[in-house]
Image (cartoon, rainbow, N blue to C red):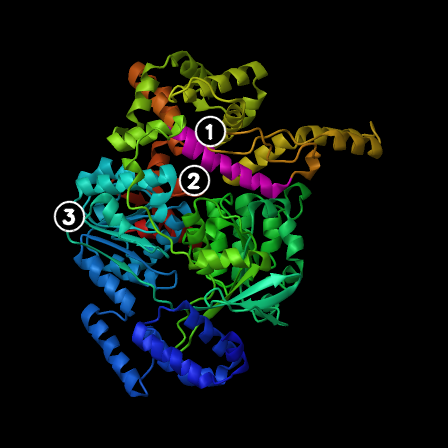
Amino acid sequence: MISDIIQGIDLETKISGILRDLHINGPVSAKDFELLSYAKKYHLETFRIFEPKLIKLMGLFYKTEAPTSLIEEVYSIFADSIIEETGRDFTPVQADAYDNILNRTYFSFSAPTSAGKSYLFREIIQETNGDIIIVVPSRALISEYYNLVLDLVDNSVLVLQFIDVINIKHTERSIFIITPERGVELFRNINRLNIELLLFDEAQLSEDGIRGMKFDSFVRRSDRYLPDVRKVFTHPFIANPEAQLLKHKFEKNSDYRLYNQVSVGKIYLSYLNGNYSYFSPHIEGQEVIPTDEDIIRERLLEGGTVLIYTSKNKIYDGTFMTMFAEYIRLCPRVTNPNALEYIARLQEFIGASDSDEDKRSTIIEMMKKGIVIHHGSMPLKARLIIEDFVNNNYARICFSTSTLAQGINMPFDVVWINNFRFTGSEEQKNLDLKNLIGRAGRNTLLKNSFDYGYVVIENENRNTFQRRINTPTNLTVTSKLDEVLNNVEEDQKDIVEAIQKESFNDELQLPQNQVERLKEANTDSDISYILENFFVDGVPITGKYYYDLTKAKRDKIKKAFKTIYISHLRRNSLKAPEAAVLSTAIPILLWQIQGKSFSEILSLRHAFLSEKDNRRNILSRMKRGEISPDEARIELDQILIRYSPMAESLPNKALRHHSVFAEHTPASNLDYDILVYDTYDYIDKVISLSLRDPLSAAFDLYYNEHNDERAIALSNYIRYGTNDEIEIWLVRYGFSFDDIDWLKEVIDNIDENEIVFNQGINDLDEDKFEIIERFVN
């Protein structure tokens, strides 16, 4: 069938037949959209005759013009009825979902990535009068929603990436965008909020082990406190969205929908030894069709965009650059001033340098050619800069890992799935693949225009690809909350038990049994030792001061932190690899306490790992003539990168000793980008997700027992990064630490009621004023 379409055999009859099927069955056949994509690609003039009718049959009424036939007139009447009913230019899918969201207490639906969910949610958010909580699986999605919501609302709406009650004097309603882990904050503030809508986006997170249990726990607990509040569950490519209702027994005033409607076509190619072939995963027995075209090359030369899904290892070791060198060479250097501004912002954030060889960054060098790198160990702020860079059409190629399968809205003309090692269950692998495919092709706003994209895979993966794309993805209809604890790992039993029994300490953000262990543990002497050595004249010591301490003192501080951390666990010791990760995290935690920026932390860590002082000393001796250049080179080559364990979440009994840098690597060859990734992982996985809550809780409890102000100060430093009251308020208002210094200069007063700015805001540059604008009254 594809060959016939390409050759134009009986083309008009075939297109007419597809349109007839669309009219009868709706736009639900991926195979039909695949054939239409070939028809438009190879026979544009003929295809344009049918295109206006096709767009109306697809229900994309916002892309249609005046009808020119009877059937088009019928669909125009349909479109007018939707506008009359909803007041909006919705597609039929959007209109049906809109009606169910407004009129059901519980509504769960599944829809492809191109179904127009973002537009639907924008309208729902604007129409809702009370407070809204949006729950998403990742912090990257938090930021995407955050930017979207800020563009929709005025200053009377408080928008936060956590749940807090602030700016009371000027807030009419609030919108909170959180991950399930932050959901506990709701129950501390629930009596002060007027929640009207709970929106659970990418709700398939419920399948994800411990995180899935936290998700389900938040769903059930919020329903117990807010039984009449509307709750919406959304998923991509899920065959049984009713599972969310069944597992929680949401029966009263509930409904679900499976929307299979397709709005973007796909053309599939396999790649083997430099050659491409068309194939179809939807047509049984369809043979591959060799083509002389190089779709990647063509799209890049035409200004198109390409997403290459690859492995983290290939990004870390740089092999992605050699594998795709011919396409990288096609990308010219970026000249657009706005694009260069994004690059400059990213370079400043990570502290990379064009002039300092030690700090040269492949991330920045690639970005200067319109090539971006995107993965989970990329700092969140860097990812957001990169996503803006892509969505503003400055990027030509994006090399990404699975982070883009998490619902981040970054469409591309071509998606090349180079890495087929998806993780998780078979259901999860199928879903991640479908999500990636959904990034191929963008649904434009061009009138009467049918859109399509390309998907490329290695030929060896064709059969697996075809099986996965055609296998329905189902959610389980029972929650892991209802399972027994027998098969749960020891380190996870506390959290599972607390979720099941609702024995969670909301104030300390720990399971209650862990709080009890902290209370009963004999850690007073350890906490006292840390407090005595962490404060000099009431100020926390610096990272340099810490390294200047004797090794015995540093070891004792590490041991004290380790003892405190272990005391909240079910076991009384850490494995050696766990202890190594904890020891590495402590100086980074210290630098955070000192208010160091991310780039400053990178610089300090780089100097330590690369033995910068020793290398400088060798070069100084050479300049003074004490050693020859050859002797200096030999000595420099003998200085190796210090061992640094790869960052991993704690506790983790299965952890193994694994250095983030290759062994026996000269210190001068330290890869700056890998340092960026690993440092962010330490801040994110180790400090924020593993250490913050138990350590902060231990110092809070010590303060309650001994009334030692240093303990509450250190708890604040660990939890907020500061003990300064104004700075804590600024953090609660959602401001970044990178902005706190200049913010304090323009603020006269700040509390839960409002921020009172002084006249200094009149002298702020545009970028800084935009940061505070929504709080200026």
Q: Residue at x 39, y 50 (%)?
A: 141
Amino acid type at image mark 1: Asn
694 and 295: which is toward the camera: 295
Task: Measuring from the top left, give residue 97's x and y in whole percent.
Answer: 25, 61
Estimate the x, y position of residue 460 in percent, counting from the top left.
59, 56
Give whichever of discs 3 and 2 has the lower sequence position.
Answer: 3
- Residue 123: image quadrant is bottom left
Q: Secondary structure at mark 3?
A: loop
Q: Earlier in the sequence, mark 1 or mark 2?
A: 1
Residue 262 visible in the shown view: yes
Q: Is 448 drawn above or below residue 132 in the view shown? A: below
**Any part of residue 749 in sight:** no
**What residue sits right under mark 1 in the picture?**
652
Q: Which residues are magenta?
A: 671-693
Residue 27 is covered by the magenta coloring: no
What amino acid type is highlighted by mark number 2?
Phe
Residue under numbered circle 3: 228
Front: mark 1 or 3:
1
Question: What residue sits right under mark 2 in the picture?
Answer: 737
Q: Mark 3, mark 2: which one is toward the viewer?
A: 3
The quarter of the picture where residue 626 lies is top right
In-image side of 316 versus 124 (left or right): right
